[in-house]
Amino acid sequence: MQALILAGGKGTRLRPLTVYTPKPVVPICNRPFLLYQIDTLRRAGITDITLSLSYQPFKIEQQLGDGSDFGVKITYTVEPQPMGTAGAYKFAEDLIREPTVVFNGDIVTDLDLKAVIRQHNERKAAATIVLAPVENPSAYGVVETEEDGRVRRFLEKPKPDETSCNNINAGTYILDPKVLDFVPAGESYSFEYNLFPDLLKRGEGFYAHVPSAAYWIDIGTPARYLQVHHDILRGGVRGILLKDRRGSFDSATHAEIDNLSVIADDCTLKPGAQVFNSVLGEGVHVEEKARIENSVVWPHTRVGAGAQVVGAIVGRGCHIGRSASVGAGAVLGDKTNLTDYTQTGGAL
Ligand code: GDD
Ligand code: MG
């Protein structure tokens, strides 16, 4: 079994965070996101991993290298322009020899991948798709199934009246290499809009896997990016346990940090600074009486005296002026400079 991670999207919905940092390496609790997917694969014994890139590939290669630091072997394919999800799989054809686990490169899960592989093999399926239940499926691909687990219908981004099914495509597939023959070469092609409906028309063995219990989230919007942090901080993701929430940093005796927060190396917390339920990247500087709550702050940002950052995401190297308020839902791109006393929206 080998793996292909689709990581070529532009991450437009995560802008401005993805202007300088491609979505596959945005930090989650201070680790590049793709490392969590690599962990999931390694746990299932899969170490031969191809990363399918298109947008800012060098920044991703720079961080992950050949994978040896993480106990895997990473190979890269870079499309000259995005070929679509199935087009990217076809583009990697020369590297694919075996059944392949395909991941959308923006989902965090603690799925038992071994169980998915086992079921795929037992059913001798051409394709297996993992499902996740969600409340509102309109932003996803809906997968309707028969009693025996066969996929009956696949409907990408349905309108509310098109389906009553709440099981969606979790962005994890196992594909037999014969599926490559159903994807045209050299053109843009989509799993969701083209290949999956085509597999159904051809009557191929296309099955769904329903995990017994698994955490699942697509981190592709700021709200969900923040959500995954809160879920991990409170220990809500079984497969992701934070070993060490505290790096080595300087904290005044009168600074207050709760047990949930993660603080990286080289941060500075001045007297009266408060950090609750938040993640601070390396070298973040929090001045006197500043408060950071329910937020994610990327490395080398400075939060001025008396400023408040609540329910927000703050990019790299920002400067939040003194007594400024950064409110719920705010997303500040790298190097944002907020003048003293600035107020951004959100209820504080
Ligand atoms: N290499 C490559 N080339 N990767 C691509 C391309 C491409 O042309 N287009 C998209 N990707 C990657 C993205 O980087 C992302 O990791 C993944 O494919 C899915 O693309 P998104 O743009 O994030 O799709 P989505 O979130 O709207 O919907 C998809 O994911 C949902 C689950 O999160 C669909 O697969 C839905 O059916 C699914 O429910
Ligand atoms: Mg997505």
Image (cartoon, rainbow, N blue to C red):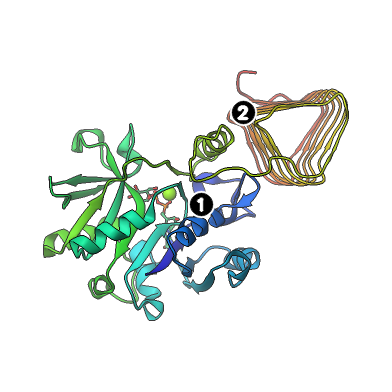
Please tell me whether mark 1 sits on a helix, a strand or a loop.
loop
Please state the horizontal and vertical placement of residue 29, each as a whole percent of the image.
62, 44
Judge by depth and name the residue closer to the eye, 183 or 134: 134
Judge by depth and name the residue closer to the eye, 190 or 95: 95
Labelled disc at residue 337: none
Judge by depth and name the residue closer to the eye, 258 or 230: 258
- 322 sits to left or right of 90: right
The amino acid sitting under disc 1 is Gly
Please state the horizontal and vertical placement of residue 139, each as a whole percent of the image.
35, 41
Q: In the rendered image, which quarter contains the N terminus?
A: bottom left
Please tell me whether mark 2 sits on a helix, a strand or a loop.
loop
Query: Eyeballing the image, is 294 above or below 316?
Result: above
Q: Which residue is most to the bottom?
A: 94
Q: Which residue is mark 2?
A: 311
Marks 2/1 in contact by CB < 8 Å: the verdict is no
**Res. 211 in view:** yes
Residue shown at 55% from the left, 38% from the top:
232
Mark 2 and mark 1 lie on one chain; the one further toward the N terminus is 1
Is disc 1's CB within 8 Å of ligand 1? yes
**Res. 7 in view:** no
Please state the horizontal and vertical placement of residue 336, each as a whole percent of the image.
73, 41
Q: Quadrant of residue 214?
A: top left
Q: Which residue is mark 1?
A: 11
